Image (tube, coloured by chain):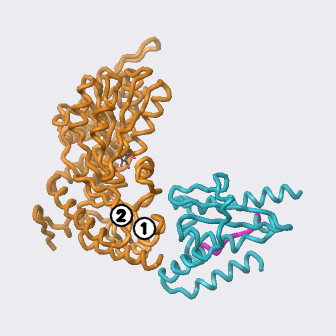
Amino acid sequence: MMTTTSAVSFDIERIRADFPILDQEVNGRKLVYFDNAATTQKPVAVIEALMNYYRGYNANIHRGIHTLAEKATADFEASRRAVRDFLNAPSAEEIIFTSGTTMGINLVAQTYGRHFLKAGDEIIISGLEHHSNIVPWQMLAGEKGLTVRAIPVLENGELDMETFDTMLSDRTKIVAVNHASNSLGTVNPVKEIIAKAHAVGAVVLVDGAQASSHLEIDVQDLDVDFYAFSAHKLYGPTGIGALYGKRALLEAMPPYMGGGEMIKEVTFEKTTFNDLPYKFEAGTPNIADVVALKTALEYINSIGKSTISAYENHLLTYATEQVSQIEGVRIIGQAKEKISVLSFVLEGIHHQDIGIILDQQGIAVRTGHHCTQPVMDRFCILGTTRASFAFYNTIEEIDKLVAGLHRVKKLMA
Amino acid sequence: MTINETQDEIIEEFELFDDWEGKYEYIIDLGKKLAPFEEQFRTEDHIIKGCQSRVWLHAELNGDKVVFTADSDAIIVKGLISMLVKVLSRHTPEEIINADLYFMERVGLQQHLAQTRSNGLASMLKQMKTYALAFSALKN
Ligand SMILES: Cc1ncc(COP(=O)(O)O)c(C=O)c1O
């Protein structure tokens, strides 16, 4: 079956066949997986890349001179270049492998933040942040006597950019915001935020956990200082991600963890640190998952980001229209530009009850605060039901969600 | 009725349902019918926080029996609570401490007691036993 929208046409059946996990029943119904903002499913190619690595050439990298070690090292470094291209970074040395977005943010907080910030300095985050882009800054602030301030969120789920302008000053040293919000789907005007932050001399970290699978990312065009993402949210394995940082900043920053790989020479008197990016990659890295990350990026590129986002927008628009028509539904987050995340509350029905009854019908959604409690406080709610779509989802599945929600209402009436 | 007799009665009731909808309709109904929770106990020290829904639990000794009352802001959890209260309330601390709760599994609802559900139900059950332990220690 060909799914055709105004902007895109691709073979959805063929794409779904690449994701074996989708072909199963949950509670006696065909699985409908709408929890893609939490983690995406993996195509066969990624699963095979992991298996091929462990079956064929598992070896420790960068030190062995034997054939397997050379192949593992070559694939590992090829993945770094694939990430460079994915983000359009100037060089592969500016790509640091991490365990994910959370580690990327903590790395910047604990090295750049700890080294360069002093009492009285300010960090600006936003009211849309995931806890992992709040807590690392609070920990740093507590330790060093800094202030963390949050850009307020408007009723439609967009950031209050007028207030942001008034928050910036020469005390502002770091601005850390997400590119897209996981709980509301809002795409933030990061290019504008970066330009304004640079104008007062602050550096900017962008949390790309959500945006990286939906939007074209160009760190040079954004002029962003740090960009962090997680592979598991872009069809790759868990436990791996990358941090991009501008070379001059990375060079000025002290290392994060000490150990093997990150050193040049060690004596008991003195250690000299390795060059970028190894300075930030202490210990044996997550080689298998790095290798498979490259496969995930290749898979995304084979479809194309513009095809992906056009199709996902089509799903989001349809889902928003259909779900809005259900009596008692209030959509939380109606920003002009959104990734394919639909968050809503249903009047008089607890989100957990919605989640349980949808699960009985084989539909996987996320309910709760989505690790963004400040967002929930802002809208005076305890949580939402969130359906988040990927390019392997279909219009028919959205129809099942709508039918499922009607069933929830009937049961709860 | 003993704890096990109540459990067996619930299991029998659930045998009437042949699909998930009937089962959940019944649980939701139990939730709606749960005796109102006394507002004076709706305080921070009676709350059992789950990531998803909140549960309030109060326990007091009536003669030698423990009486539980509880509430939740989510209706399915409230229905499940209603069953737990029905099974464990009005028994001696010793009976509660030694209770082997098998009915949730037998009626196919054990997944709601899993910690991953983070609905406070598993913590509530633990808290019920803790109360029983405390009352038992008080007595001896
Ligand atoms: C916006 C955002 N930031 C950060 C994270 C944390 O990502 P990870 O748990 O992969 O480190 C997430 C994951 O849910 C997210 O959605």
The residue that appears at 25% across and 22% down in the rendered structure is: A248
Cβ at disc 2 under 8 Å from ligand 1: no
Image quadrant where residue A344 sits: bottom left
Give the chain ID for the cyan colour. B
Give the chain ID for the orange colour. A
What is the x, y in percent for residue A127? Answer: 38, 43
Q: Is residue B92 left or right of residue A17?
A: right
Check disc 2 and report the residue beneath it: A330
What is the x, y in percent for residue B10? Answer: 64, 80
- Number of marks: 2
Quadrant holding the N terminus of chain A: bottom left
Please, what is the three-letter code of the amino acid marked with disc 2?
A: Arg
The mark found on residue A347 in the picture is 1
The residue that appears at 40% across and 34% down in the rendered structure is: A149
Q: Which residues are magenta?
A: B97-104
Q: Nearer the viewer, residue A240 or A314?
A: A314
Q: Quick check: A130 above or below A273?
A: below
Q: Verify CB contact (< 8 Å) between mark 2 and mark 1.
A: yes
What is the x, y in percent for residue A130? Answer: 39, 45
Magenta span: chief secondary structure? loop
Q: Is residue B18 magenta?
A: no
Image quadrant where residue A29 sits: bottom left
Please, what is the three-letter code of the amino acid marked with disc 1?
A: Glu
Mark 2 and mark 1 on one chain: yes
Q: Quick check: B139 above or below A402?
A: above
Q: Residues within 10 Å of mark 1 (few under 14, many from 20)?
A: few
Q: Is residue B102 magenta?
A: yes
